[in-house]
Image (spheres, coloured by chain):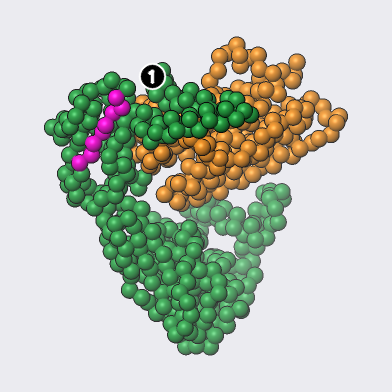
Chain colours: A orange, B green
Amino acid sequence: MAKLPQDIHQAQLTLLLAAVMGCSQVLDQSVSLASERTSIERTYELTKYLDHQLKEIRDTYLSYLGPPFSDRDFSPPRPNSSSLSLPSAATRVDLWRGLENGVRLAQNQRAYTILLCAVKELASSTLCPYLQSSLLHFCSGLSGLLGAISGLMNTLGYTPPSHGNIPPLQGTTPIISAAPAPNDFSRKVEGFWVLRELQSWLQRSAKDFNRLKKRLRA
Amino acid sequence: MNSSHLYAYSDHREENSAWIWNEGESSSRLFFIFSLILLIPQVFSSSTHLAVISPQDPTLPIGSNLTASCTVSAHLGLSASSLYWTLNGRRLPSTMYTILGPTTLTLSLHGLNGSRQRSGDNLVCHRGNGGVLAGSCLYVGMPPEKPVNLSCWSRNTKDLRCSWSPGGQGETFINTRYALKYKLRWYGREKVCEDYSAGPGYSCYIPRDLAIFTPYEIWVEATNQLGSAISDVITLDILDVVTTDPPPNVQVSRVGDLDDLLTVRWGSPPALKDYLFRAKYQIRYRLEGSRDWTVVADVGNQTSCQLAGLRPGTVYFVQVRCNPVGIYGTKKPGIWSEWSHPTAASTPNSEHLCDSKPGEQNSTLRKELKQFFGWMRKHAYGCADVSIKLYDQWRVWLQKAHKKAQPGRYYGAVNHSTQQT
């Protein structure tokens, strides 16, 4: 039955999260760089794990949306909604290299805060129960990643941005909503893009944490 | 990403920023209101859309016809003749199109089939180079029919699980919601079951607050965008439909060296103690490669049984199930439980080890080792002490057990209670 791989993933995820949380919540003043690098390594591993999980969920979700969303080269225009108001994962190489550690982590934190809300919304509007529970399970992984990033920012001494607990942007619609009223098709396009952005960010985060690790070694 | 697309979706930003400026002054208030008045029409215009499709996200019965229109925004400078439609990714032929105006293309669809996916069929209006302008999700299905095959059972006299099937196929193409409702027959308000996630397929689980010795009325209501339907009502007393878990700890073992016997032992279900029922059991077994089960229908209420007349040197799969009878002193039979997980065992080879050919010797040895590991799990705590000595100890034990077994052969099934080892 489909549940069994989820149970195994659940167990693996719990172990990984416990390891990461255990490591990143050490607020000892004399913490050595070695333990910080272990924290970063574990966060890196969590990122790779979520990236792997996402591939499967994305395939299932795209076939739920149906063609043309499930077609290989399909690319609808990117909507300009609050769910997608996150910074782009893509950035110029020189700018990316030059990112200061705190800024690098803050960018990741902002991106995943928005993506977590977006995926939760995606899950709640999904009509297929199995897919819905897969997405919610994935949300708990994303939540763990956010926690790990916040923990890292703490241990490395970077103050998280003031909107650390960002209220969901969709709850505060501006007086003039410039986006067109959402319909079912445009919600599908939005869902398509949320998962695409999530994929880009998980791949970018892996590189971010690798770079962070190298920098701390120096 | 096409930069023109970016422009089309982001041009509202410049309009938005105009009113944030200069908030403190009274003159800015007028400016604010003025901008508001100017901008409100923009919200309702289609300038922020690339195109608009009508109808947007309709729900339709199977077999119906649909005429859809795509009106593209004037500022894109596209003509209706350059547009085309796709349905679920497949391009529709232009014979189905009608040009209604300079910027409006319509499509006529006939005899729609049920939706390909629950999230709706994707009807999309494209510009000439393939870019997506707008889309509409079509939900094509049928109103629900009376749900059928409603049946319920209780695991432990306190809960109730019910399952049913949709009355028709048409309702499965669109999102149809099912609500299982129940009430005490002679009094009480109607309650709705809440947990639909538990079982496979269409089922619901009521975990608590159920009365026994009194009948319930239970039914299912199906609703979707096209209509609703209610199943027939079934009436039952929870005690009529009690089942239990399959018997735990099913063990199958040889009877010494006797090559056509196997002994099956199992535990009695834990619920037996709590719910005051007697249990009766059934056993079924089959050969390893076969699909035909032999059922021992009347095992009574013993927790062990001997299977006889088996083939020597063969692997058998055995399962046991349980039926709670006389629940709380009533004479009612319950519902048979699921079969236990299959337990495998093999009968000994009739030929002596030393006489058999090397190939047969290997398969016999393999089967012996299988039994050895089973014995090990019972008697060896942890795997740290595994060694060839343990294997030799076991061989000695086996010979002693063989000497204790009664001589001669059994014919026909014999039930006798044996002590648990």
Tell me which corner region of the image, top left, top right, bottom left or bottom right, holds residue A67. top left
Q: Is residue B72 magenta?
A: yes
Instruction: Provide residue A17's location: percent of width, then percent of height.
Output: 66, 40
Give the residue at x 56% y 40%.
A172
Instruction: Provide residue B38's location: percent of width, then percent of height.
Output: 43, 30
Q: Residue furthest top?
A: A94
Q: From the viewer's perspective, is residue A65 above or below residue B320? A: above
Instruction: Provide residue A30's location: percent of width, then percent of height.
Output: 86, 29
Q: Chain of mark 1?
A: B
Kindly identify which residue carries mark 1. Answer: B4
Q: Nearer the viewer, residue A44 or B271?
A: A44
Give the residue at x 61% y 46%.
A11
Q: From the viewer's perspective, is residue B255 above or below residue B58? A: below
Residues drawn in magenta: B67-74
The N terminus of chain B, quarter of image: top left
Residue A128 visible in rendering: yes
Q: Nearer the viewer, residue B124 or B323?
A: B124
Residue B336 visible in rendering: no
Find numbered disc 1 in the image and state the secondary structure of the residue it sits on: helix
Give the residue at x 41% y 78%.
B217
Main SS, magenta region, reads strand
Q: Is residue B3 magenta?
A: no
Instruction: Provide residue B169's location: percent of width, then percent of height.
Output: 27, 57
* Total number of numbered discs in the rendering: 1
Q: Residue furthest right?
A: A30
The C terminus of chain B, quarter of image: bottom right
Q: Nearer the viewer, residue B187 or B201?
A: B187
Give the residue at x 60% y 22%.
A207
- The amino acid type, in three-letter code, at marker 1 is Ser
Q: Assess disc 1: are there few (<14), some (14-19) or many (≥20) residues with their C-alpha within 10 Å of its C-alpha.
A: few
Q: Nearer the viewer, residue B203 or B177?
A: B177
